[in-house]
Image (cartoon, rainbow, N blue to C red):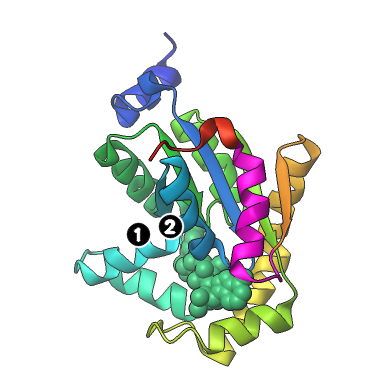
Amino acid sequence: MGTVEAANKDANGSLLEKNPTVVFVLGGPGSGKGTQCANIVENFGYTHLSAGDLLRAEIKSGSENGTMIQNMIKEGKIVPSEVTIKLLQKAMQESGNDKFLIDGFPRNEENRAAFEKVTGIEPAFVLFFECPEEEMERRLLSRNQGREDDNIETIRKRFKVFLESSLPVINYYDAKGKVRKIDAARPIEEVFETVKGIFGPKNEKAD
Ligand SMILES: Nc1ncnc2c1ncn2[C@@H]1O[C@H](COP(=O)(O)OP(=O)(O)OP(=O)(O)O)[C@@H](O)[C@H]1O
Ligand SMILES: Nc1ccn([C@H]2C[C@H](O)[C@@H](COP(=O)(O)O)O2)c(=O)n1
Ligand SMILES: [Mg+2]
């Protein structure tokens, strides 16, 4: 085994041995990624890992990176991959599962390339929740979960970052035939009907 491969295997612990299934869940802020991931977990046995949730938990934990992460989130900016990937790897290892919905990651080309290099994992496919900005803005302004970035000033910055940095990642995977685009502007139940069609009846959990 080459040195890079050996180092990655070491960093990933037993993760790679499980040959994990990873689905990246992407879409603009407020497109419904978290909402639909909760439904997928219930029906298909995946573990949901939201990069944003992991970063917010890191702030709360009082970690040395907390202030940097908090400032970046307030500005709608993307935290360096090194930090986010470590949190994702740890959560994947701790879950004990081998099927993951990675929500809100990769958010830019740096995230994408670093994840592939560090973990050696390629996504099975990418769910892309497509939604007009006006609808996403409405949803974010009425989310009421006390998120510091759900204010109109930060929301506009997040939309800009999505268009400039995250859409190119979606286009990258689209060129590889991996994107499953979903019209996310419809009611939650209707969106989930489409999602179910993508995961397929053979993957559904038995009751
Ligand atoms: N299809 C939908 N129709 C109407 N409201 C929705 C729909 N999907 C989600 N919502 C609501 O919109 C808000 C944002 O949804 P959610 O948190 O799932 O989005 P998200 O894509 O994870 O956003 P973020 O990127 O900011 O984390 C929530 O209040 C949620 O209840
Ligand atoms: N890969 C990521 C994911 C998220 N963040 C930061 C920046 C986002 O605006 C914020 C909230 O994410 P969300 O919960 O909306 O998915 O978290 C990041 O830097 N890198
Ligand atoms: Mg979310």
For the view shown, which residue lies furthest in the right direction?
Answer: 175
Left or right of 160 on screen, residue 50: left
Name the image quarter holding the C terminus. top left
Q: Position of residue 178 (x, y in %)?
A: 71, 38
Residue on which disc 1 sits: 54
Mark 1: secondary structure? helix
Q: Residue placed at 39% from the left, 82% from the top? A: 145
Circle 1: residue type: Leu
Q: Residue placed at 36% from the left, 70% from the top? A: 68
Q: Position of residue 85 (x, y in %)?
A: 41, 47
Q: Quadrant of residue 148?
A: bottom left
Q: Residue placed at 69% from the left, 65% from the top? A: 184
State yes or no: residue 188 in magenta.
Answer: yes
Which residues fall within the magenta stretch?
A: 184-200
For the view shown, which residue lies furthest in the left direction?
Answer: 62
Residue on which disc 2 sits: 50
Circle 2 crowding by C-alpha within 10 Å: few under 14, some 14–19, many from 20: some
Q: Is residue 174 above or below residue 6?
A: below
Q: Quadrant of residue 50?
A: bottom left
Q: Position of residue 81 (x, y in %)?
A: 46, 51
Label 2 CB, ligand 3: below 8 Å? yes
Circle 1 crowding by C-alpha within 10 Å: few under 14, some 14–19, many from 20: some
Whole-angstrom CA distance, mark 2 to mark 1, is: 6 Å
Q: Are marks 2 and 1 in contact (CB under 8 Å)?
A: yes
